[in-house]
Amino acid sequence: MSGRRIVKQRRRADVGIIGGGLAGLSLAYYLSQFHDLKILVIDDGMPKPDHIWGFWDNGSPHLALAREQALSQWWHWQVAAPGNAHVMRGEGYHYYAVSSASYMKALADKCARANVRFINGTVMKTSINEDYTRMLMKDEQIVTAHHVFDTVNYIAPYDCMKQHFLGQHIRVNKNSFNPGQIMLMDFRVPQQDGIHFMYLLPFSEKKAFIESTVFSQTQLEPEWYREQIAQYINRSLHLKNEQVTVLKEEVGVLPMSKVKSKQGEGCIPFGVAANAMRASSSYAFAQINRQAYDYARAETLLWGVPEAGADFFERWMDDVMLDVLTKNPELAPHLFSRMAQKVPADDFARFMNGRSGFVPKFRTINAMPAGPFLKTIVGI
Ligand SMILES: Cc1cc2nc3c(=O)[nH]c(=O)nc-3n(C[C@H](O)[C@H](O)[C@H](O)COP(=O)(O)OP(=O)(O)OC[C@H]3O[C@@H](n4cnc5c(N)ncnc54)[C@H](O)[C@@H]3O)c2cc1C
């Protein structure tokens, strides 16, 4: 006889969600707001180190909780390349930053208040049984639900370009930052190890988050990013090492590519597994929130695969952009600073968020240098 046990349930869950990260909890929260469903979230409880989520918004309903939780918001964002710095001034759109730990706690509290149930465990395999899906857990228990969403099983091509970074929350001993404006991308840094830029979020005149980000295939040693940040602080902010205190650090590696869902039998891919992440930027926060909100607010749930973070044309544009950057990494500073100069800030934000209209797409294409893009498009 098998030692597997079916977890005792008063009533089989209507919805099971594999993964209690941003995608899983956002989906659970919005489903609980719009429908009367018995929802179960299963998470393996792996540590989730706190980090910053940055995103653009213009007051959309799917980001209401995120705006409430924001550490700060900015109207102006700058892109700088050698000999060329341009500030984009958002009108409807602002750039926000939230702490992932605080946001996830707020989301988990909302879910708990809406009677979403949490199970701590690892889902190993799923299978279909009559009109429900069985989830086999690592401890051999079996959990069942009528509809199961999988936010964790997907793969990106192993050799794809990646965005890898190390960020530091710093405090300095003299007023050095302009809290009204972020540095979205500063390419005035060494470019030998990949497409490299600094990202700086000033929280006050003395406190900021600063990150060294690289687009390339290979992650670098932590010391490399630390050294880049230290040099940048010395050179651009004219601060000596002893004037800077590093409060905490965060690191990450994100794929810059479409991903392929590897969901098991009877599962609906969701979140990054359903391509919520923008391939050309790895932004996923606003996109996952929108995906969950739009899916859940449908009057009749159809249980299909949700919409990706970008529409078909934007995904094609992302592919072209990544191909151009892979073949011509030296063009990146020029390309992004051209975008900052030529695309109005709100259209830039709309395009970054994905599922934008004709105008932001047209303006973005129009800002691109024609030669390398045409070569990629005609496959030269
Ligand atoms: C450091 C960092 C910074 C980022 N910054 C930004 C940003 O500024 N802006 C932006 O838009 N995006 C950003 N992103 C990208 C994006 O927002 C995140 O990747 C987002 O957290 C994805 O959420 P998720 O739910 O898909 O995955 P996760 O948050 O990884 O959640 C998946 C959960 O499932 C659990 N799990 C895995 N396997 C199983 C299993 N078999 N059974 C049960 N549970 C399982 C994991 O432990 C985890 O808790 C950042 C990502 C990182 C890592």
Image (tube, rainbow, N blue to C red):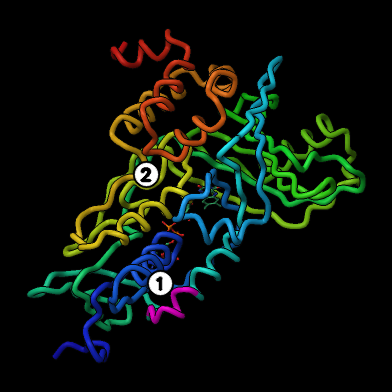
Q: Is residue 188 above or below residue 217?
A: above
> Which residue is depicted at the point 40% across and 52% down?
290
Q: Considering the image in quadrants, where does the C terminus appear?
A: top left
Q: Considering the image in quadrants, where does the N terminus appear?
A: bottom left
User: Label 2, on which residue?
Assistant: 309
Q: Position of residue 47 (x, y in %)?
A: 53, 68
Mark pair 1, 2: CA separation: 23 Å
Dot 1 beta carbon under 8 Å from ligand 1: yes
Q: Position of residue 172 (x, y in %)?
A: 86, 48
Q: Position of residue 249 (x, y in %)?
A: 69, 54
Residue count near mark 2 (Cα–Cα under 10 Å), binned few <14, some 14–19, many ≥20: many
Residue type at numbered disc 2: Gly
User: Label 1, on which residue?
Assistant: 43
Q: Is residue 137 above or below residue 65?
A: below
Give the extent of the magenta segment.
110-116
Pointer 1 or 2: first along the chain: 1
Give the SS element for disc 2.
Answer: loop
